Image (cartoon, rainbow, N blue to C red):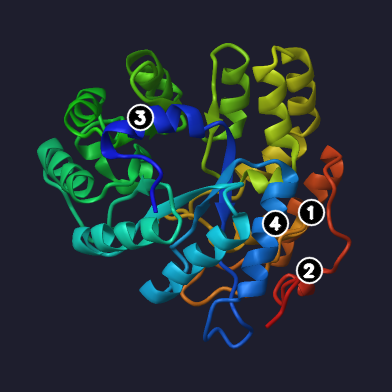
Amino acid sequence: MLSYSRSEARAWARERMQGVANVVIPSYTADMRDINEAGIRHDVRLEVELGFCGFLLVAETTLTDEEYLRFVEISADEAKGRQLLIHHATFNTLEDNIKLANEAAARGAELSLLSYPPSWYPKNAQDIYDYTKAFCDNVDMAVMLFPVPLWGFERIHPASLSADLMQRLIDDCPTVVAIKAEGGHPSIGGFTEAWYRFNEQVVVTMPLEQQGIPFSTIVPMQFIGTSNTEYFGRAIPQMLNLAREGKNDEAMRLYWQTDPARQANGRIGAIGGVNTVHRMAWKYQAWLTGFNGGPLRQPTARIVGSQMAFLRQALINSGIPCTDDPDEAFFVGRNPA
């Protein structure tokens, strides 16, 4: 159950959203017929150990509704309040997203990352406003807006969600507490505009560490998330902590040390032409630094030997602890079931 009311949501977010939040991709049994509880619990424990403040409960790997809610429940039980659990509002329809957000909140999720269904095609900014406000009006959980090129809204505004649209939503929806500001990526314009316009109203984050860490040395960035920062082990939480302590030289020293991993990560982005995230690659990246790994259901992107080789070598070159296990072990997972 939520620990705050709708009117308290922004104050709660300012206090609770502190640190680096990454992602946990659910693990599955070997026969793909169910989620793997032991694998999920393993990953949540490692989140705590590596110093992350929370994680996105990734829903884009063909989970059933019931499986997703068990994923939330297992994660909350293992985290025991030590992690901020971020609900992934990325289901098929507005009605589905409202229903599952409320059920996820009842099982331990505290913040909702609002996505938009791939089969939904808004005609204008008012359509985006209406969808977002309907979600916020019917869900008590705090909401993080997510302007990003994945939705294809650039035909409406180059920043995906324009600053004027986000201002309307902040004014009209008290549960809008944060902005994951990737609008206009790879330009930094979406983040900088969101920061100077909204940072005193809601939490503004640059989730991409390659920009978020340098920004944190010049602005008081309290939260970075959500992205696949588990690929860097504990390095990104360490960098943000150093920057927040005013130790910018140390933060940037570590930043440059890990640049080989950063460059490799940049080669595993959205799959060309289909506007989605390479979850199989992200799960492999996490496995390299100790997470469970294991199989993913179809449909999924594939990761091949050449990709695995450069991702592994980049960690070694960055001085980030990396498993010695052979790549075939990734497809089994550390806690096979």
Question: Which residue does the numbered mark 1 point to in the structure image?
Answer: 312
Task: Return the disc, 1 or 3, that comes first in the chain's sequence.
Answer: 3
Q: Tell me whether the residue at label 2 lies in contact with that at label 3, contact meaning CB atoms closer than 8 angstroms.
A: no
The CA distance from mark 4 to mark 1 is 23 Å
Q: CA distance from mark 4 to mark 2?
A: 23 Å
Q: Identify the amino acid type marked 4.
A: Arg
Quadrant location of the C terminus in the rendered image = bottom right
Which amino acid lies under the numbered mark 1 shown in the image of this protein? Arg
Q: Which residue is mark 2?
A: 327
Residue 241 rendering spot, x and y as whole percentages = 69, 25
Query: Which one is closest to the eye, mark 4 or mark 1?
Result: 4
Which element is circle 2 on? helix
Q: Amino acid at mark 3?
A: Arg
**N-term mark: 2 or 3:** 3
- Asked whether 183 or 251 is in front, the reply is 251
Whether tag 4 and tag 2 are in contact, CB under 8 A, the answer is: no
Image x and y of residue 309, in percent = 78, 58
If the image is split into quadrants, where does the N terminus sit?
bottom left
Tag 3: Cα neighbours inside 10 Å, few (<14), some, or many (≥20)?
A: many
Between label 1 and label 3, give the one nearer the viewer: 3
The residue that appears at 20% across and 29% down in the rendered structure is 165
- Give residue 10's mark: 3
Q: Earlier in the sequence, mark 4 or mark 2?
A: 4
Residue 66 vertical placement versus 177 (above, below): below
Q: CA distance from mark 1 to mark 2?
A: 10 Å
